[in-house]
Amino acid sequence: MAIIEVKVPQLSESVAEATMLQWKKKPGEAVAADEILIEIETDKVVLEVPAPSAGVLVELVVGDGGTVVSDQVIARIDTDGKAAAAAPAAAVAAAPAAAPVAAAAAPASSSMAGVAMPAAAKLMADAGMAAGSVAGTGKDGRVTKGDVLAAAAAPKAAPAPAAAPKAALQQVATAAIPLGERPEQRVPMTRLRARVAERLLQSQSTNAILTTFNEVNMAPVMAMRSKFQDSFTKEHGCKLGFMSFFVKAAVHALKKFPVLNASVDGNDIVYHGYFDIGIAVGSPRGLVVPILRNADQMSFADIEKKIAEFGKKAAEGKLGIEEMTGGTFSISNGGTFGSMMSTPIINPPQSAILGVHATKDRAVVENGQIVIRPINYLAMSYDHRIIDGREAVLGLVAMKDALEDPARLLFNI
């Protein structure tokens, strides 16, 4: 018998511990080399833990929901074992009580059929749905987020309270728990949600946040986008969106007013000679802010491709810690969800953030005449400790001017 250990991946220095989500295998089942055994959630990302070698899973050291740290042993694999062998009783007993419950229905096959994508696995764990209980329609039979949502919405008989484990009952969807006319559901915060809450409170308690607003006529950007959309798509293989214009306009303003790109460190102001722009992205786990590194050196196509990559990774829970670390300025696009106005909260240790909203036709006055224009209301929140109103207002005006006359971006004026 050759036993190898499955360990927690190395976490970043800023991440002290992580939470086990749901085992995809149970003791006694065969595993293939590099097959994903479980996802581990930190306050920033979800990390996949692959099998270091092929063999048979003989022991779960830490079960679903357990708290772990870097390099901690969480399971053991027998590289000489056979799947037909029964799991040792000690192996099952070693894992917390919650571990066998979620893993019991895991498929014995080492193929990808029935394997849940990270976002789908998270939804299943939150709803108390056993692995293998949802049919997959994705590539190679993988379970997608849509499969889980469809399964949750399908009519089914409510389980008897005594048949479901207490831990699962606490997280199962409200629709599955008949609680009378005034139902309630208590679900623990995920590590990401708890971390977001902590950082937002930190931002409001340590920064002197003030927000300035302006309106932008988006007609020039829309006309340019419409004119070059087809040729841009053919040349670069991606669509020309609006976010690349906002990123370019923001960098344009940050160059003019460097304090907007600065941060506070004790009694010092740190001016950054680079432009790492955070792009707020919604994900099944909550809000994440991946970073466009050296955005000033990126083309429109580079920006659009990277944002599309971030969106896909966020939906699948694949964003890495390094992709969300740092940042000197952020952009939050509430307009994606229909927001007309907001006061975004600064993402510490940054000192400013731009809020972008939905573009709607508005009646405006031009040359003494009332005309209809597509208007977007921009909001920039800033730390008044180091940024005066003058720099903040003029910085937002610089963004407005760049968007209303995109040619300024070419000549840096």
Image (cartoon, rainbow, N blue to C red):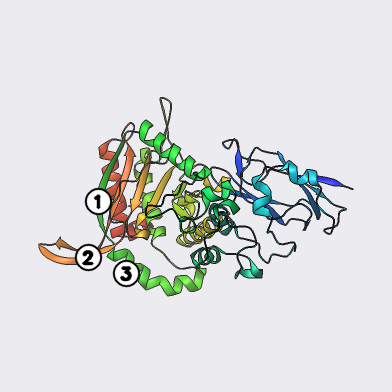
Which image quadrant is residue 97 in?
top right
Secondary-structure class at tag 1? strand
Q: Secondary structure at mark 2?
A: strand
Q: Is residue 172 above or below residue 204?
A: below
- Whichever of callouts 3 and 2 sits on the residue coming sooner in the sequence is 3
Q: Residue at x 65, y 69 (%)?
A: 141
- Relative depth, front residue between 19 and 84: 84
Q: Residue drawn 52% across and 53% down? A: 172
User: Which residue is label 1 attached to?
Assistant: 214
Residue 306: give x, y in percent of width and height: 51, 58
The disc labelled 3 sits on which kind of residue? Ala
Residues at marks 1 and 2 touching, judged by CB atoms closer than 8 Å = no
Q: As drawn, is 124 to the left or to the right of 391?
A: right
Q: In the rendered structure, which disc, 3 or 1, sits on the residue that comes first in sequence?
A: 1
First along the sequence among labels 1 and 2: 1
Tell which residue pokes out farthest to the right in this image.
1
Would you place residue 107 above or below residue 211 in this image? below
Q: What label sits on residue 373 in the rendered view? A: 2
Residues packed near mark 1 inside 10 Å, few (<14), some (14 to 19) or many (20 plus):
some
Q: What is the distance, in whole Å, between disc 1 and disc 2 at their CAs?
A: 15 Å
At label 2, counting other C-alpha atoms closer than 10 Å, the crowd grade (few under 14, some 14-19, many 20 or more) is: some
At label 1, the amino acid type is Asn
Q: CA distance from mark 3 to mark 1?
A: 21 Å
Under circle 3, the secondary element is: helix
- Estimate the spatial distance between the alpha carbons at disc 3 and disc 2, rounded to whole Å: 12 Å
Q: Nearer the viewer, residue 133 or 235?
A: 133
Q: Nearer the viewer, mark 3 or mark 2?
A: 2
Numbered circle sitting on residue 223 = 3
